[in-house]
Image (spheres, rainbow, N blue to C red):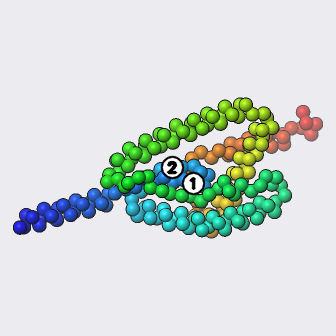
Amino acid sequence: MRNGLIWMATVLMAAGLARAETVSLVQITDMRGQTGFEILNREEYAALQKEIKEETAAYAVAAAESRKQWEADKENKLPFPGSKIKPRTARKMGADFQSREKAEAKKSRLEERASEKQLEEMDKESKQKKLMKDEDLAKEANRVKTFEDALAMISKRMAEKLGRPVPAFGMTFGEPAKDDAKKDEKKEEKKPAGGH
């Protein structure tokens, strides 16, 4: 009888430990639409859901304020791209894992597939840009800059309301264009008054 109780206690403890190690593979999409994967335990996932709920509430106000500021600025020639910017989301990818190692293996496979897909998209985009005329390239660069400016406005307002920055994944497409624009401005400043 006593051995049976010890055995039952051992099984219950093992089940408790296994339950404590349960993790979820979570796909998180940032405001740009970039995705990343995280392995989170139950408490971390609950905390992430709470953050996202706060961000979603702050987003509505920040986007409305940013749109108003955007439309008041006569320098902005393109419409406010607010519909392309969305609050962060998180969703579990399948069932929970009993070990972190299995979750890491699944995460690696998903990241590899996402990386391959991103490389294919970048290659396709590069080929399309080679076929575009200079004026179309300038329009595309302007659209990217407009998106980045709007995203920065919304992100800044959200950070002020939340008291923390909103996390993001991925590469920041559009920042190199800003750097190039700054370099061009500096070149213009260095040119003599005659323009040569």
Q: Quadrant of the C terminus?
A: top right
Q: What residue type is disc 2 on?
A: Gly
Q: Is residue 163 visible?
A: no
Describe residue 140's horizontal placement relative to residue 114 as left or right. right
- Which residue sits at x=24%, y=60%? 15
Q: Quadrant of residue 178?
A: top right
Tell which circle, 2 or 1, labels the residue nearer the N-terminal end. Answer: 1
Find the residue positioned furthest to the left: 1
- Which residue sits at x=54%, y=39%? 117
Q: Secondary structure at mark 2?
A: strand
Describe residue 78's horizontal placement relative to residue 194 as left or right. left
Q: Position of residue 75 (x, y in %)?
A: 83, 55
Q: What residue type is disc 1 on?
A: Asp
How crowded pointer 2 is (Cα within 10 Å; few <14, some 14-19, many 20+) is rated as: some
Q: Position of residue 160 (x, y in %)?
A: 64, 66
Q: Which mark is residue 54?
A: none
**In the rendered image, the vertical position of residue 18 relative to residue 187, given as above or below:** below
Q: Quadrant of the N terminus?
A: bottom left
Q: Secondary structure at mark 1?
A: loop
Disc 1 designates what residue? 30
Q: Quadrant of residue 56?
A: bottom right
Q: Position of residue 138 (x, y in %)?
A: 78, 40
Q: Quadrant of residue 26?
A: bottom left
- Which residue sits at x=74%, y=56%? 80
Towards the viewer: 164 or 19: 19
How crowded pointer 1 is (Cα within 10 Å; few <14, some 14-19, many 20+) is rated as: many
Asked whether the beta carbons under mark 2 and mark 1 sit within 8 Å of each other, the answer is: yes
**In the rendered image, the vertical position of residue 132 relative to residue 73, given as above or below:** above
Q: How many numbered discs, if any?
A: 2
Disc 2 designates what residue? 36
Q: Position of residue 7 (x, y in %)?
A: 13, 62
